[in-house]
Amino acid sequence: MRWSYKNITNTNAVTYLQHQLRVSPLIATLLVQRGIETYEQAREFFRPELKDLHNPYLMKDMDKAVQRIEEALAANERILVFGDYDVDGTTSVALVSAYLRTLHSEIDTYIPDRYGEGYGISNKGIDYAEDNGITLIIALDCGIKSIDKVEYAKQKGIDFIICDHHLPGDMIPDAVAVLDAKQKDCPYPYKELCGCGVGFKLIQALGMRRNQSIETFIPYLDLVATAIAADIVPITGENRVLAKFGLEVLNKNPRAGIRAMMSAFTLSTFTITDVVFKIAPRINAAGRIKHGNYAVRLLTEIDYEEALDFAKEIEAFNENRKQLDGEITKEALLQIETLQELDNATTVVYHENWHKGVIGIVASRLIETHYRPTLVFTKSGNYLAASARSVKGFDVYRALESCEQHLQQFGGHMYAAGLTIEEQKYTDFKTAFEKVVRETLPDELKKPELEIDAIIDFEELDDKTLRLLKQFEPHGPENMTPVFVTSNVFDTGNAQAIGKNGEHLRLFVKQNGSKPFPAIAFGKGALCAQTRNLQLMNLAYSISENEWKDKVTVQLQVKDFQMMD
């Protein structure tokens, strides 16, 4: 693993914040690294408030969207709330449909089948609307490129309101209203909302028509926080406010469905990391293994006992998902070895029976072992379908563009993509992709990168600093958990390999005369012997909390270490 150190160019801002906030140089440096350079920016960062949320009517077409919904309510029209099958899509549908049902009884929901319909607005969904007398569709987390689908609906007398957060194409669908802050002519100040965030702004705007205060919408923020965490959007600005208050709802009074899922865990407090690794995979498992409707049903259920039954179904889907991705990962790793492709620049594997719903997860797992751009193929109808994942700094979408002549279709972004090809073109594509990556992947990107925020001594981790570091939460893109390096660190002699198979490493580390800190190094149990005999090391770590038997203690989460000569 290569270590890289963040640079600070604006040292004046560090000095300014240090004096204005009366904080250490370390805290001031971390703030400037995150683009916070003024007292007011720091106040909003440390003390986010609901009043910091922007007026939803600043978003282009919001007035048109609200007007059309009001007309539908007045005329008793049937409304269909349509969304994608992932976490962002299903939480969006749950949020908007739950609010609209407080105003109107004629609300239906629709999630497309991952395998039968694929991503986004579908003709089948529009046909469903026509067959059920629906005259308005609100599409969430999808639709910004659905030119033909919106036209198809218009021919059937069905209007569309699109709420999306993906980048628009050259043309915008001819819908009644298109809510997407990434449109070039949209003046909305914050551009990084997830799909559920856009849905929240829609119901906020509807509520303002009814003189409802922002406090009315706090109960919906558990859904928004879940979507923000799962969709890996920046935890900055408005997202930071929504995530902070959403986590409070999650921990104090979550909706029945989320509370039912949370009952499977013994945690007293859920962090954004817990949402990412515990709640989000379960919601996603419904669409991967069965159907996204199961997730919407869970998230909209009011009765807790009913929600517990739905949560058990979701848990079963997740267990099935874990078993599948575990088995497929083993088969894929064996395939790489059997085909003698350990030294390739890429990982491209295929089996016709691999489950399409988990190949993206498998691609990410394979990168953990073989750190290189990865594609996992399976059979899908008359074609082969793949999920692509990339390593930090390498644009896999552009690499696929270079192989476009071999592809049936593809889409995605820098680090993740999906594609289909004709089966007979698999070998030629695999060869072409390997060639492109081998020629364009720089040597420095062939090893995982660990970004270091600061070099510190343990004595800097006093109580005040630890309290302030806690206030940097919630963490996520553009506000990642700070990583520190401390030199001349040694284990006190109590290093242990722990876990079922001794896969993790438990340490108690000191520096010079400092107090000992408990530390955990996940996946490094085999290195236990290296840390003994008081040998000095450079330790890279983040600060975390360990909860055990209702007691919360500070511990270091080790990212990597280098033994010193």
Image (tube, helix red, strand yellow):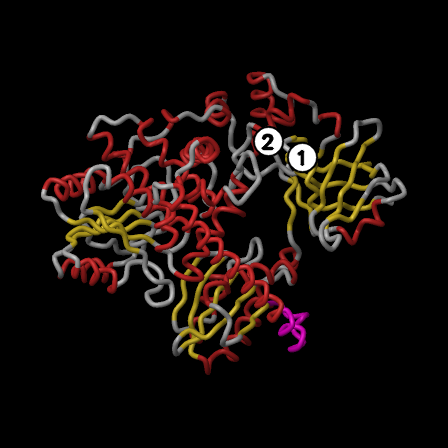
Which residue is label 2 attached to?
30
Asked if one can make out residue 543 in the rendered structure from this viewpoint, the answer is no
The answer to the question of whether label 2 and label 1 lie on touching residues, with beta carbons closer than 8 A, is yes
Which of marks 1 and 2 precedes in the sequence? 2
Residue 264 in the image, given as x and y percentages of width and height: 53, 45
Looking at the picture, tell me which residue is in the foreground, 49 or 425: 49
Residue 158 in the image, given as x and y percentages of width and height: 15, 55
In the displayed structure, does residue 76 sit left or right of residue 51? Answer: left
Q: Residue furthest toward the left?
A: 75
In the displayed structure, does residue 481 sit left or right of residue 288? Answer: right
Q: Splitting the image into 4 quarters, where does residue 501 fall?
A: bottom right
**Amino acid, disc 1:** Ala
Looking at the picture, tell me which residue is in the foreground, 91 or 68: 91
In the displayed structure, does residue 278 sit left or right of residue 108? Answer: right
Q: Residue at x 49, y 76 (%)?
A: 352
Which residue is label 1 attached to?
454
Quadrant location, the C terminus: top right
Where 282 sits versus 271, above or below? below
Q: CA distance from mark 2 to mark 1?
A: 8 Å
Residue 164 in the image, given as x and y percentages of width and height: 32, 48
* Numbered disc 1: secondary structure: strand
Residue 120 in the image, given as x and y percentages of width and height: 32, 58
* Numbered disc 2: secondary structure: helix
Q: Residue furthest toward the bottom?
A: 424
In the displayed structure, does residue 235 sit left or right of residue 173? Answer: right
| Label tally | 2
**Amino acid, disc 2:** Leu
Q: Residue furthest toward the right?
A: 533
In magenta segment, residue 343: yes
What stretch of residues is rendered in magenta? 333-346
